[in-house]
Amino acid sequence: MRRVSLTQYLVEQERKLHHVQPELRLLIEVVARACKAISHAVGKGELADVLGAAGTDNVQGEAQKKLDVISNEVLIEANSWGGSLAAMASEEMDEPFQIPNEYPKGRYLLLFDPLDGSSNIDVNVSIGTIFSVLECPPEVTTPDEASFLQPGTRQVAAGFAVYGPSTTLVLTVGHGTVGFTLDREVGSWILTQPRIEIPVETKEFSINMSNARNWPAPVKRYIDECLAGKEGPLGKDFNMRWVASMVADVYRILSRGGVFMYPADAKHKEGRLRLLYEANPMSFIVEQAGGAASTGTQRILDVQPSRLHQRIGVILGSREEVERVASYYAAAR
Ligand code: AFP
């Protein structure tokens, strides 16, 4: 089999399809390189004293882990000097990060969740990094929060890395979704899934069942029907998985189908997941793989963000099931 590296893949996209500009290619390569460094730190674990709490809270009042802070620093440092970016925004930082004056500014905005699945860091379960790329509005020289408040349809690239049994990188530049695996000895990302397609229907659902008492009626209806199995209205037995790292749950859905749900509910009124750092990039990736992503009442990618750290309800994965859940929301209105 011909081994295609990330660089080669991006150069080929640039040459054949002209939809990856050199500036965007450099940006994606730098993010992927930072993910390698984070993967390395994650892999060392206890040996490098990177586990445990950092002793600080992020803007959302969540206790930060040492690896949250390290991953954020790695991404900021790696992406400050390349000249592709106008600014960055991170789930772990209150305000947008401005590119230091000593470096040239570029046309893109980078958003990231440096280490998704923090609760899994100390227990050696898969975690990851999620990123999204937008164009900086043309008239803006010093991007502020408003510059980042663009609907997910405006993303020019999105991806995520999973630090699991193998280290993988899923990427879309708006022309399908592809996957790479890190060859750890060589230090190179190799294209291992040239075309990811989510099966249209599924028999697997992914939700935190401990929130059941708080769910809205349409979600309760759908999960009750899944649990009813062959004898129920859906006529098939379902399986359930919940890793509590969105990167790992979405990776599984990209590999073998399924539906992932973290809806807005009575406890998480706006939803639990972050629109700009989690929901938008994952929805872009899932749609590009033939799946669907909805809040229950609206396509996620069409949502106009109102705040940088906004949260939102998320239902994504196999198209048929996402549409079924959305139809239950419509019926309940
Ligand atoms: P963190 O990034 O704050 O660790 O949260 C992980 C996450 O945003 C997402 O990756 C999981 O799907 C979800 O939260 C898990 O939430 P619960 O702990 O409520 O199940």
Image: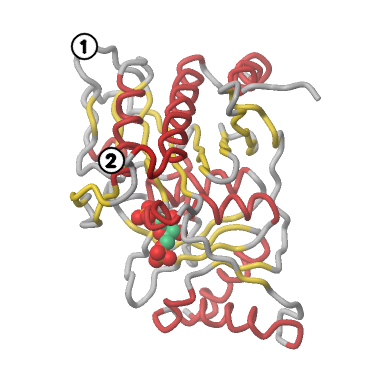
Q: Residue at x 62, y 28 (%)?
A: 183
In the figure, residue 132 lies in which quadrant? Answer: top left
- Work out which quarter of the rendered image holds the N terminus and state it: top right
Residue 148 picture location, percent across and down: 31, 38
Residue at which label 1 appears = 102
Judged from the image, the secondary structure of the residue bearing numbered disc 2 is: helix
- Closer to the camera in the image, 46 or 94: 46
Is 164 above or below relative to 298?
above
Q: Residue at x 62, y 54 (%)?
A: 252
Residue type at tag 1: Glu
Is 76 above or below relative to 236?
above
Left or right: residue 23 versus residue 137 is: right
Judged from the image, the secondary structure of the residue bearing numbered disc 1 is: loop
Look at the image and tell me whether residue 311 can be seen: yes
User: Can you tell me which quadrant of the image ligand 1 is in?
Assistant: bottom left
Q: Residue at x 37, y 64 (%)?
A: 271
Q: How many marks?
A: 2
Mark 1 / mark 2, whichever is N-terminal: 2
